[in-house]
Image (cartoon, rainbow, N blue to C red):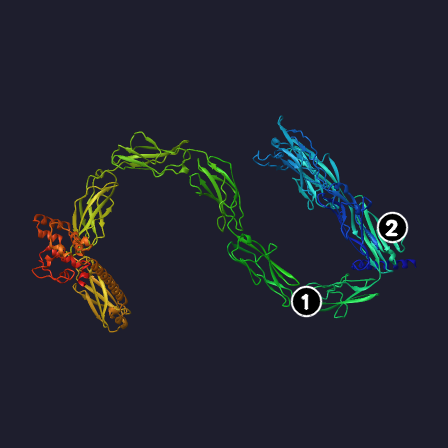
Amino acid sequence: MPLPVTMGLLVRSILLLSVWQQLSAIEVPLEVKQPPTIIKQSLKDHVVDAGTNMVIECEATATPRPIFSWRRNGKYFNVALDSQVTMRRHSGTLEIYAWANPEAYEGEYQCVVTNALGIAYSNKIFLRISKAPLWPKEVLEPVTVSVGHPLVLNCNPPPGPPKPEIYWMSKCSSGRPFNWPHRPHPPVILPVKQDRRVSMGVNGDLYFSNVYLNDSATDYCCNARFPYKNIIQQKTPVIVRVLTTRMLSEAAPTLLSPAGKASSQTVLQGEEFLLECIAAGIPTPVITWIKDGGDLDTTNMKVKNYNKLLQIPKASIQDAGEYTCMAQNKIGYVEHTITVRVKAAPFWLEKPTNLVLAPEENARLVCQADGNPRPTIHWFINGDTIENPPSVPNMEVSGDTINFHSVTVAHNGVYQCNASNQYGYLFANAYINVLHAKSRILKPRVTQVKVIEGKCAWLDCRYFGSPKPDLRWSKHGLGNLEGNRFQVHSNGTLQIKVTRMEDQGTYLCVVSNVAGRDENEVKLEVKKATKIVKRPEHTEVVRGTDVRFDCTAEHDTTVDITTTWLKNKQFLYIGWRLSLEKSTLVIKNVNRRDEGNYTCIIKTELEQNTATAQLLVKDRPDPPTDLVLSQPYERSVRLTWTPGDSNNSPIKEYLVQYDEDDWLPFNWKNLSSYPGNLNSVILQLSPFIIYEFRVIAINDIGMSKPSHSSDVFRTGGAPPDAIPKNLKGVGSWRNNMKISWEKLNNREWNGPHLKYLVWWKRKDSREEWKNATTMWCYYNIYDTDIFTAYELKVQAVNDFGLGPESPVVIGYSGEDRPTAAPLNLRVSMIEATEVKVHWDPVPQKSIMGALKEYKVYFWRDSSRLRWLGVSRAVKTRAFEASGPLLSGTLSGLMPYSNYKMYIVVANNRYEGHPSNTIEFSTPEGTPTAPRSFRIQQRHLDTIWVDWDSPAEPNGIVTGYKLTYRTVNATEDKVEKFPPNTTSFSLPRYDRYTRYRFTIAARTSVGEGESYSEESPHYTTEIYARDQVDLSTQGWVIGVMCAVALVVLILLVVCFIKRSRGGKYPVRDKKAVTLEPVDDKEEEGSFDYRSLERISRVTTIPYSARREEETKVGRGQTTADTLMKRTESDDSLVDYADGREIEFNEDGSFIGQYTGHKDRDDRDTEFSEGRSQDAHSPMSPIYSFA
């Protein structure tokens, strides 16, 4: 029977174990008494910066409130006695303010947390101060090595902590000291370029597999960067001197690191480890790796530094084994095997947890850990070692487990577990808290839960009690919810998987134990899911256009939604260009800054849905940068640039432009274009030109801005390549020839001092070529024969040599005036408008040049109608010489006219003597259309038409033909008239009928051109309007008012003048003098008739005036004559005639206005004066007065 009892106890223990595991998941409220629990502490290896406050963390919870204390290097550390150390309130965290001597606080620290129910201990924290020690001052002698030998430059950096980062730099000496401003530029320290030949080892040393001669061009220094202080320390630079005293020979590989044939490494699981293999040799060896005799699996490792380094970020047991590196070149190879052993510090399998137990319950604490080697487990209670057997009853320690039976308050306390091996340790606290508490649901209590249909619903019911309460969930208080879609978790939470609309309702959570019972109702509301039905789409647009991102969602009507837009995960600011139309985002006039990912967030109180779209803005590309010129040659140079951003439209073409030194700034010209996948091209250039270049990128959107210009580049000089174009020789006078050509442009000079070498000789002669050099683009040859052929050629020449010769062309010396005139000029086939002209050719020698043409001069001398006047303007017509029988057709003549004509021969410069002049007459033709065709309606029932004779009758007009019909009719009516009839009247039977008239004249040849016109749309109203009296027309009234105003102004002027000067000195006129005296000037009066007389005399033609002056000069000058010449037209003599003359009271002469003069009509002067007065603008005024 003992065996069944034992088995029964085992089964019961297993059941109790499952209960114990559930106990650990119950949350213990802080108001319940409990031992300390450490919730935060610093790392075991704690490295701090002494420049700031050194903090060692220790935080814990407990009821009643715990007391914190510290142990330092295994002894109690009295914080209160150290003025540089403080402990935070209600916390165990230490703050050390050690500015003077921080190294004194390095050591091992442990936090102790105590209350009435137990004592908890933290890990042992090893505090270290971050250091950045300097390299020792030393004088490094230059390192001397021969070409091809290996070289190792040692670094030996300070150890830290922490371990520094190592960098090797060159040109270090130029950086110390930097004396500004005596040195114009700051130092340039460059990193050492690493490759298969040169590399840095894991220990920081710099390895050269073989040394080149240029390795001595600089010095080398090792730099260490300490991350905590962010300080870089530099070692004294070392100078390398490379000797070339011996021949460079090839060498088999030898290992520089590691040394020997084999080595071993031990690495801890989870840590990084590195394997390196660096070899020397000529040529530089190639490194390969194998593991355990097979291929190396690099899945979980990285191969770096040209296969010289294997990096495994986290070591595992599978990484243990033998790694073999092989260095090989064409001379030989060498191997090294590294045995890797992977060990493990202790790690948790099961960590002990706090237990809350009721009296008489059973429980256990488990502390399971593993490692390599396997760790040793030690148990403590409140910091004291648990004896075996323990002194506390009903407690049994069994390796990594402590079993408790029928617990009591005597078992309360904090238990510590320590698992350790030679590579580290684990330390954990777990308490046992035995108490009796009734069931309770912890606050805050959840009363309402909202969930989306189809999602999981979590109904919380956090509870506590001792012994552990029973938990039951029901809906509307009916049944027990468990299984299928319902799951109750150990912390009391009810999970409903894939909720449905029918899951809505009230759920009841009930907890109970022997000490009491508690319950809580939770109302569940299920909402329909929100769904984005119209999502924003990825968009590519051209800059400057508008973009719309739609984001429309369907949602439950009982919940409110908000729409938010993000750009690149940042909230989008809605401004003047960005606006929201409901949930649609509108971006106006997009630019490059608008590019990115736009996310629409539809959010409710329960969920949020997102939709993302990318906006790509296409734009002209950015300009290329960093233009570099290389590989200069006489006629080419390589141009390299860095492409700019294509702005989402691929670059299809690059346009290279150049600017010459032509004194015109910014005169950029296109040189050539290249495909968009190139950024380095060879430019074909002209010699002896100063160039600047720039590059423009082109895509489908357009051209980029030009790049910055390159450096100035000048090509070398060369003889000219170009041949002067358009070479010709033309005589400008009878005995010379001007040889001319087009000058070369500046780009074709190819060198300085460009000139032209001209060659000439007579054609078909044996004479030598003659030449001359000129800087102009022409050269004159004198003393030549008339119109002689010469062979010509020209070539350009500069300081670098002669250019190519042009092809030989034929030029001619100057021409002279032809000496002969064409003979036997005659006409035939005379028609109304054209005639056939014939003439005999002149001898070739008499042309005195190249025959250009025969030119006919002709003019219309008169019309055969004597009454018709014509224009005698001379016209010309040129005819080419073709064949021995020369003729041509002269067109454009007027019919029925008399013409005269002669002909001359012409060369390229002169026309010859005219031939004999001949006369001919053209026959009749058809006339032109009649002129001045008019349609009038003089009465309501009659239409009157009339016309004039043709401007060019082209013969004798024999009559007129008038054709008319109504506008809509198809049948014409014809009226014929004799030549003296030029009008026709047509009765109207309908006032609305319109007619179309066509008039034409005819001669004996036939009918000439016609003229057509439609009659206006005459109606009664139009006729009545046409018959309205002109006095009622507005424009007539306006004209009359203007005339009246002008007359009124003139009258006012007249009366003003009369009131000022209308008196005559009658008394003085009685005494006649022989000399004319103008007495009117004394009184300021003005004689208007004297003006008329002056104007009359000045308008007489010059011949008439001379005749009149002659007659007067031949006659005797008498007093009467003088009187006639000097007195005014108002003289009494003119009006006397033996009759009595009336005077006014003031003595003025009334006869000026009322008397009559009797003059002989034969008096020319008087008659002319009368005619002048009649046209004088002042006459109407006097007559009106």
- Describe residue 539's horizontal placement relative to residue 523 as left or right: left
Quadrant in the rendering for residue 196? top right
Name the amino acid, label 1. Val
Foreground of the two, 33 or 408: 33
Q: Is residue 323 visible?
A: yes
- Indicate which disc, 2 or 1, sits on the residue closer to the N terminus: 2
Name the amino acid, label 2. Ile
Q: Position of residue 9 (x, y in %)?
A: 88, 59
- Describe residue 579's horizontal placement relative to residue 474 as left or right: left
Compute the Cα span from label 2 to label 1: 55 Å
- Mark 1 residue crowding within 10 angstroms, few (<14) / some (14–19) / many (20+): many
Q: Position of residue 605 (x, y in %)?
A: 66, 63
Classify the position of the N terminus by image quarter: bottom right
The extreme right residue here reads 1
Q: Is residue 929 visible?
A: no
Q: Which residue is labeled 2 in the image?
A: 386
Q: Which residue is labeled 1 in the image?
A: 526
- Reply above or below: 976 against 146: below
Badge 1 marks a residue whose secondary structure is: strand
Classify the position of the C terminus by image quarter: bottom left
- Mark 2 residue crowding within 10 angstroms, few (<14) / some (14–19) / many (20+): some
Q: Which mark is residue 715?
A: none
The extreme bottom residue here reads 989
Q: Residue at x 89, y 56 (%)?
A: 394
